[in-house]
Amino acid sequence: MMTEFSLAFEEEISEVASSSGVTSPIDPKQISDHPFLKASVGITGATLNIGGCKVIFPAMAVWKKVTIQISVLYQEADDVIRLTPMLQCEPHGLTFRKKIEIVLPTFYRADGDALDVAVRRAKDKFSSFEKIGMDMLLDDTQHFTFTTDQFSLFDYILFDASKRMNLLREKVLIFGLRPNTEEAPKEIFSAVLVCHDKESAMELYNINKLMKTNFFLKYEDHKLKLELKGEHLNALTEEIRDARCERDETCFRMKKNNNQGWISDDIEVCLTSSSDETLVKKIVTINKEDRVPRPQSDVTTNFSQSTFHNATVNTSLLHNERDSNTLWSKCSIL
């Protein structure tokens, strides 16, 4: 029988971080956004989905009810090519009578031949990782699945780092407008966000999102060219110096060259690589309703993609840590 569960939301970052009790090689307080949940799992088993990751406990995996915590950590390493988020399962070292199944999503694809990947776990709370299995990254891989009989910190890496040039990274481009209450303003401001998929779920402060599209970026394509075009708009261009950034945000000041206001106009958003390959080419229509202010959410927490079966769950997600006074965000190289 399904067990009732409750969701508890914490807005304050300090409260959430201190309540997590996380001890691992990775300090979650140094990571701006990471979903985590606490759950009680019994002998009937359970299935937990959070942050695109899944943990499946078969019946009789545990012989009595246990309280666990699952954390999804987004951080890439300097010495390896990490292909998935890290999944921290606690208590570290907890063993099971039957193996559990873990599914980790990946935003990478193989550009051509299949690539060898390794699944790893942390040896203990404060030491290095060890390889526990192998898999293949294909041109259509979206997730990896493995089984384990104990809790640890898990991830997938590219087995041979020298093959990194054969990787494609899925990215997201978002086009939005800063709200303007004028009837037909002659000048408006737009923002273009090039980011990882997890960042695209974040609320954009004081920006109306008009378009979102995914594209694949070659590993060696660091520099991109962003261009906005329109029938009555002089082309606006900007260089993205390192597209490996987790989040790159560019603001454009758009003024029509026919001295008329923005009422209903088409804008072409183009993104090209350093080798002139077109990555994104989209037409966005700007209407009045797209320019006026929209309701802003007070809390950026969103659990619409989290599901829990046969578990009593207390779930928390760090509040989005952004500077609300600027369109620009810090860019950490991954």
Image (cartoon, helix red, strand yellow):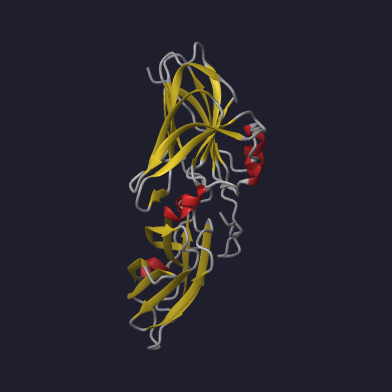
Asked if one can make out residue 205 in the rendered structure from this viewpoint, the answer is no
User: Is residue 242 placed above or below 99 in the rendered structure?
Assistant: below
x and y percent of residue 35 in the render?
53, 39
Query: Which residue appears at 64% of the width and 33% of the height?
Result: 22
Q: Which of 77 and 260 is in front in this view?
A: 77
* 316 or 186: nearer the viewer: 316
Relative depth, front residue between 332 and 266? 332
Name above or below for residue 221 compared with residue 104. below
Q: Position of residue 190 (x, y in %)?
A: 46, 70
294 sits left or right of 329 in the view: left
Is residue 331 in view? Answer: yes
Quarter of the image for the C terminus: give it.
bottom right
The residue at 47%/52% (across/down) is: 164
Name the residue furthest bottom.
Answer: 258
Q: Farthest top residue?
A: 63
| In-front residue for pair 180/89 | 89
Whether residue 213 is situated above or below residue 253 in the rendered picture: above
Please determine whether, in this image, residue 315 is positioned above or below residue 253.
above
- Counting from the top left corner in percent of width and height, residue 5 is at 46, 26
Which residue does the image show at 52% across and 34% down from the upper left?
A: 120
Q: Tell me: 129 left or right of 173.
A: right
| Label tally | 0
